[in-house]
Image (spheres, grey):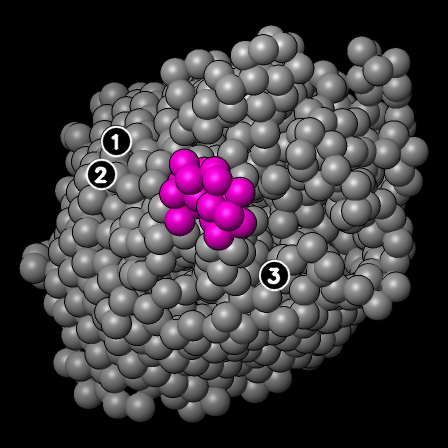
Amino acid sequence: MLYHHHRIALLLSSVAFVGTTPAVAQTTQQPPETEAADPDRTDDVHDRRRDTQNVIIVSAQGLRQFDLLAGTSVVEDVELQRNLDGQLGEVLAHLPGVSATGFSPGASRPVLRGFSGERVKVLVDGVGAIDVSNTSDDHAVSIDPLNAESIEVLRGPAVLLFGSQAIGGAVNVIDKRIPRRIPDEPVHVDALVRADTATDLREAGASVDVPFGQTGLVAHFGGSWRETGDLEIPGFSIAPALRAELLEEAAEEEAEGEFEEADELRKAADQRGFVPNTASETWSANVGLAFIDGESTLGASFGIYDTAYGIPGRPGAGHHHGEEEGGEEEGGEEEEGEEEGEERVSIGLRQYRADLLADLALGDGFFERMKLRVGYSDYTHTEFEGDEVGTVFDVGGVEARLEIVQNTQGRWRGSMGAQYYARDFDAEGAEAYVAPNRTEQYALFALQEYGNGPLQLEGSARFETTSVDSVPLGIERGFDTLSGAVGLAYDGPEAFRAGVNVSRVARAPSAEELFSNGPHIATQAFEIGDPDLVTERAWGGEIYARGRLGRAEFSVAAYRSWFDNYIYLSETGFEEDDLPVFEYLQQDATYTGVEAELDYTFFDDGDWSFGTELTAEYVRAKLDDGSNVPRIPPLGLSGALEASSEAIDLRAEVEWYDGQDDVAAFETPTDGYTFVNASIAWRPLRANPAVSLMLQADNIFDVTGRRHTSFTKDFVPLAGRNITASVRLSF
């Protein structure tokens, strides 16, 4: 799946849940000269080999081509079915420039160009997910990918139009909770059923869209269910260095006569075949209603997302705050506290979410469209120690975004808008390491493009005012930030496009970075924030080129960011509650990277096509003192061979990741690994290609792989050999 960079399109009709129906009209990639002649043209283009329709659906609308959104990818159709997973990070980890936090099978957030957490914004149709997945890697993203019809990965300076949290990029999940087209059928049904062997997965999802005659009203009903067992792996779950450390500790305990402790350490070191406490169960339900009149849509939806999943503990570490409770609060009951601290930890998460969409055509005046998106979230996240409640996180939040799109005025195109965000965060319990707080943010943004010829000038700007306060701490901070970007693009023959972007971006510190002060067992650290942190700023530069050369399509981008007052966690060398103490500090930092992709069709006779897909990614990040930024993904290369006909898609691929030795002082190096995967998709109904059966085998040679971006890489490797079967239906 080659990057999709071209049109920033307005979605006037919706693709089907998990699949695509032929009746849907979409804006697709066109050569620059064609777009200049007819900027509103829409066509159905079907690339058999990739089975994708190259649509980009982002809230920052109004521009025919806006290349400040450099490095944009869209995952949908067969690509989405092949890479589907319970957590968003795992769905996208195969894309160039994308990795995942991979804390556990139940919690994995995207990592874009080495950025994660507060520097990656996760969106639902242009507004935030409003959960706590940004506060810790053990917190799941409250979005079920099974409900997605497409997922966009947005990289480049224009992504800052979605907020300062998108300084590293954004992931935008498009679903069907609010209908945006009137089905041709009296009842339209989409469904997907899937199972695998590495996690004993069983999952199913379905949606139903029902039009009410000629009234323009469409109702939507959807739901999903997913259950997995413990993750199956090849070999030992513990990395060699950690295993040697545990065996050495076991020998020391045995020498001191502590035979039970020695036996437990050896048992942990010898754990193999599966990772304990990694099972999960998830369900979701949603309902929506929309009124569609021509090119205007007004709709609302309500949904529930519920998941429960295990948190694998670091072998030999125990659950330290349990020891503290037993030893300090109950005096002579320390042994009971230690036993309680070793209880398996799990998380139960539920989010109630309401959304509103008003997408209105404004006619032929200066403004073409107005779009209002509002999302409201009531989120509760409970961490259990065995059957006992440990810590409860409550988040109530709202995000609203208003955007007005200009009609094309000669050579000028663009849009402008305003955004509001508020989040109330409260945590109670042993691991409530962040004080209750409220974040409130107001923003104005605009983006403009000038030129129809070979050269085009682009620009964007965002002003943001943010307040972060904690009443219990008696602290209130305010930040005013201004971000902007300019780009110059050249359109050549054969859809060739090249350009350069320059940006100046700013991000206010988050509540977690300001107010943390306590044990954070997920990261095995006692984290201390700094209420005096200042605004993080960065200069960015990016050059890119993409286009077609005969049967080849290519894309390459190189980028560099120079940070002032980069916020990061640093080990102090001290311990608190038997955990190493980490402080949030600031210093300058530099990120440098490159991404490339090549698709080449070497044979196509109309019945069958054969081609290859090659990708490469690399990022290097260093602090000003010469040390390395932690958890940066290594060099990654992949290659695939594909064969496609009208009914069948065949794919075989190799993914290679180098070892990572450029580590921070508290990190361990990670060995490289190579996965070999294969899949076959069959579309048995000529009249309905959205019905697809897929059989795939991942990590065929059962290789041990550890993702360097993961906090838990030393004791939670990636899945071993995994056979997956899925069926996608749309009728």
Residue 709 horizontal/vertical position (percent):
56, 56
Q: Is residue 5 left or right of residue 115?
A: left
Pick whichever, 536 or 712, lies toward us. Answer: 712
Residue 77, quarter of the rendered image: bottom left
Pick whichever, 339 or 526, lies toward us. Answer: 339
Can residue 510 be seen here? The reply is no
Residue 466, quarter of the rendered image: top right
User: Residue 265: within the magenta?
Assistant: yes
| Circle 1: residue type | Trp
Q: Residue at x 51, y 20 (%)?
A: 335
Say above or below: 510 vs 604: above
> How far apart are the alpha carbons under marks 1 and 2?
5 Å
The residue beneath circle 2 is 203
> How far apart are the alpha carbons under marks 1 and 3?
37 Å
| Circle 2: residue type | Glu
* Comparing labels 3 and 2, the label whose residue is closer to the camera: 3
Residue 722, quarter of the rendered image: bottom left
Secondary structure at numbered mark 3: loop
User: Residue 322: within the magenta?
Assistant: no
Instruction: First in sequence, mark 3 or 2: give its number.
Output: 2
| Circle 3: residue type | Thr
Q: Magenta residues?
A: 250-266
- C-beta proximity under 8 Å, tags 1 and 2: yes
Say above or below: 605 vs 162: below
From the image, which quarter does the N terminus lie in?
bottom left
The residue beneath circle 3 is 668
